[in-house]
Image: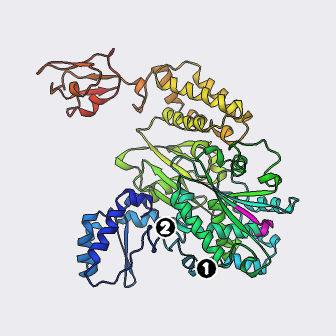
Amino acid sequence: MGPAGIAAGGKHVLESFKEALSGTGITASLKENCSSHQVGCLGLCARDVLVEIHQGGTKTVYQYVKADMVRRIVDEHLVGGTPVKEWLVDGAYDAFYKKQVKVVLSDVGRIDPEEISAYEAVGGYEAAKEVLHSWYPEEVIEEIKMSGIRGRGGAGFPTGLKWELGRKAPGETKYIVCNADEGDPGAFMDRAVIEGNAHAVIEGMIIGAYALCAHHGYVYIRAEYPLAVERLKRAISQATAKGYLGKKIFGCDFDLEIKIKLGAGAFVCGEETALIASIEGQRGQPRAKPPFPVNKGLWQKPTVINNVETLANIPYIIRRGCAWYASYGTEKSRGTKVFALTGKIKNPGLIEVPMGITLREIIEDIGGGIENGKQLKAVQTGGPSGGCIPANKLDLNVDYESLAKAGSIVGSGGMIVLDEDDCMVNVAKYFVQFTQSESCGKCVPCRVGTKRLLETLERICKGHGRSNDIERLEKLSAGIKATSLCGLGQTAPNPILSTIRYFRDEFEAHIRDKKCPAKVCKGLLTYSISEKKCKACGACLRACPSGAITGEKKTPHKIDQAKCIKCGSCFEVCKFGSVERN
C-alpha cells in the first residue's frame, strides 16, 4: 500500500482481503500502509500489488494481485493450505534482492513506521542513547569520519568532515537540517525512506546534533509528499513523548527541538543556501559562497545540512561500527547507496546496493534487463545534474569517482534506463527544459544561458539545426558551468555535454541529415503510404485530424506532406504496416 501499490489497485485488494477473511475463522493481521498496522515500501514496485503471507514461519509472496484474485488465495492457500502457484513471484523476485545490501532500507518494509515501539524493537534509538550517555562529540565525529560515508544528496562531501567543520565553527547557537527536498525526475528514494522509517532519520539528526552541539533542527520537505510529512510529524511527536526530543533527552543534559518546514516544490531549494533562505521565510534563491553554511547558515548561525539517506545511515554506523560500514563499497566511496531504478527496465523499483557495483549488475541482475526485448542504449544517473552513460560502458563501477570520470554523477540516486527507442537529443532537451524551468533567475548565466541551450535543442529537434550548433552548445555549456552562482546552473549542462560526448552521431544526424534515428522528434519525421501494402481500408483517413490523407475505396491512399502535421495518428491505426515513418 505504498504509492505504487495504491496506483496498482492496492486499496481494492486490501478491502477484498478484509471481506474474504471475515467468516473464515482464520485469525489474521493485515499489515498495510493506511491503518494502524503498516509496513513501508518493499522495493519491487514493478510487481505491485505485492502480497506477503507469513504463516507458520513460512513466507509466501504473490505478485500482480488484483481484487478478483483474493478469494481464491484465501480459499486455497489460507483455508486449504495450498498456495496458488501460478500467482507466486518468479525467480526475478529473488534476483531483485540477491545483490542488494540493505542498511538504510534494512527496516523499511519490515516495521510499522507509525509506531515508535516497532523501531525500538529492532534496536532503534539505542545508538542515540549510547552516544549521549557514553560518547564525547569528538568521538562521534571520528567514528563517522572513519566510516567513510559521504553525503548522499549529490555532492558527495565527506559527512564526518562536514560535522567537524560545524563543530569547530564559533557560535553558541547552531542548527542541523535534514534536506528532504527531493526533486529529481524519477527519484523517490528519500520519500520511501521517510515513509518507511522516519525514526531512523530523526535518530540520525539526534546523533548529529549532539556531535555539533546544536539544539535546533529542521526537516525541510516538499509539501507534495503528504504521507511522508504525516509520518514525520507522527515520529517527532512520538519521540518527544518518549523523551528522545525536547529538554534533557534520554535523561542527559542535552536539549534538541526538531521542526518541519514545508517547501513549495522548487527544485532549486535542494541547494543548501536556497533551502536556508526558504526556511528563513525568504524567496528560495541561493547565496554566494563562501561563507559556507557550516560557518554562516540559518540566520547567520553555523548550520550543517545533510540529506535524508545520509542521516538514516548514522544510527546503523554507530550501532554496528565504522569498520562494518566501511567494509562495503570502494576505497573512496564507502558504504551503500539507495537508487530509484526506473525507465525501460523489467523490474523498476527502490534498491540499495554496495558502492562499486557495476551498472551491468544493477540493470541485468537486479533490474532483470531491458523490457520488450529492446536493446539498452544508455543509463541516465544523477538527475538533471547528471549525465547519460552509453551501453558500451555497462561494466562501469557505480561510485563517485567512476561516474564523474564518465561524465555523470551519483547524485541523490536517480537512475533512468533508456533503450533503443529513446532519442538522446530529446533526452538532453528534456533535462535542460526541467532545469531552465526550475532556475530561480537570480544569476544571468543560469537564467539566460539555460534558455539559450533549450532554444538551440528545440530548434535541432524541429529540423532547423545549424552546422555550428554542437560547438555552440559546448561553448555555452562551458560558460554556464564556470559562471553560474549555484549547483543548479553549474551542473545544468551536464546532460548535454554527456550526450554530445557519447552520442555525437545522433546530434549530427539531426542537424546534417534532418533525421531522428530513434524516430522520436516529430519535426524530423515524414509519413508516407506504401501503394503495395495499402488495403484502402480508410482507417488512416478517418484518424487524420488535418485532412492530409486522401483516397477512395480500393485505391491506395496518399498523404499530402503540405497538410501533414506529423501527429502519427495514421501510423498508429494502420493494421497492415502500409504507413511508413522515416
The residue that appears at 24% across and 33% down in the rendered structure is: 573
User: Is residue 126 positioned above or below 176 on the image?
Assistant: below
Q: Residue at x 66, y 31 (%)?
A: 447
**Residue 533, x across and y down, in percent:** 19, 26
Q: Quadrant of residue 204?
A: bottom right
Residue 388 lies within the magenta run: no
Residue 332 shown left or right of residue 117 in the figure: right
> What kind of residue is marked 2?
Gly
Task: Check disc 1: other Cα within 10 Å, few if <14, some if 14-19, many if 20+.
Answer: few
Q: Is residue 561 above or below residue 89?
A: above
Amino acid marked by disc 1: Gly
Q: Depth check: 191 or 151 in front?
A: 191
Residue ranking furthest to the right: 170
Q: Is residue 83 visible?
A: no
From which residue to which does the magenta span run?
A: 210-217
Residue bearing the label numbered 1 = 123
Say what secondary structure mark 2 lies in: loop
Q: Is residue 236 left or right of residue 423?
A: right
Residue 22 spot, x, y in % from top left: 28, 78
Q: Which of marks 2 and 1 is nearer the N terminus?
A: 2
Q: Quadrant of the N terminus?
A: bottom left
The residue under label 2 is 40
**Quadrant of the image containing the C terminus:** top left
